[in-house]
Image (cartoon, coloured by chain):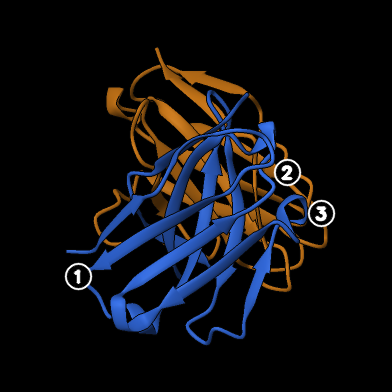
Chain colours: A orange, B blue
Amino acid sequence: QSALTQPPSASESAGQSVTISCTGTSSDVGGYNFVSWYQQHPGKTPKLIIYEVTKRPSGVPDRFSGSKSGNTASLTVSGLQAEDEADYYCNSYAGARTWVFGGGTKLTVL
Amino acid sequence: EVQLVESGGGLVQPGGSLRLSCAASGFSFRNYSMNWVRQAPGKGLEWVAYIGFVTSFIDYRDSVKGRFTVSRDNARNSLYLQMNNLRDEDTALYYCARGTNWAFDSWGQGTRVTVSS
């Protein structure tokens, strides 16, 4: 149950795109198409923004997209807006009804 | 509207016990799996425990196995986490989270647990 690996921080200018990576193993990210991503603003509750690698819940802007290749999943935020500045966490199902989160990435919109 | 409201947190000494509760409303609780997820101060999210809508399906992260017990009462639309033999490293904000499509689609506001002498 080792945490997935995310970069601690990322930054990009408003209007541009940024991609956050999430690296696991063949026992979690690489083994299942059950990667999800969460956005958490300071002092707020996490919010699901991507599930099953690429799917967006109702109400999540299509500026948010997900993908996966091998043991690495990615979240891309296009057309960055000031309100996208937050912490982002990836999560993967790891088998036997267990899940594992990444360490989180602090996104700064310049 | 889905609502999850946690309670039961507090300050406890190492080795002590606490029972967290999560009251659910706005959805058919008995039809959903539920989870506990925690976040230590200034740290990331950490999955803690899962209970299926079929309560025979239960699992925990390794560090809490044998100390924590998750349960649910579908008649009361409630989720519980019994935490025994608490350690300093269990200090965190504990969220209950609804499980859907192998993800956590709704979260409560959390209840804070502090383990300290």
Q: Between tags 3 and 1, which lies in front? A: 1
Question: Mark 3 touching mark 1, by CB under 8 A?
Answer: no
Chain under label 3?
Answer: A
Tag 2 secondary structure: loop
- Residue receiving disc 2: A3
Locate the C terminus of chain B by quadrant. Answer: top right
- Residue receiving disc 1: B26
Q: Residue furthest left?
A: B1
Locate the N terminus of chain B by quadrant. Answer: bottom left
Separation of disc 3 and disc 1 at Cα? Answer: 37 Å
Percent across and percent down for residue B105 are 39, 60
Separation of disc 1 and disc 2 at Cα? Answer: 32 Å
Percent across and percent down for residue A25 are 81, 54
Tag 3 secondary structure: loop
Q: Is residue B101 visible?
A: no
3 and 2 marks on the same chain: yes
Disc 1 residue crowd, few under 14, some 14–19, many 20+, Cα 10 Å: few
Task: Decide: is A61 above or below B28.
Answer: above
Residue at point 40% right, 52% down?
A48
Chain under label 2?
Answer: A
Does residue B110 appear left or right of residue A105 in this picture? left
- Residue receiving disc 3: A25
3 and 1 marks on the same chain: no
Task: Decide: is B28 above or below B117.
Answer: below
Does residue A1 appear left or right of residue B82 in this picture? right
Separation of disc 3 and disc 2 at Cα? Answer: 10 Å
Disc 3 residue crowd, few under 14, some 14–19, many 20+, Cα 10 Å: some
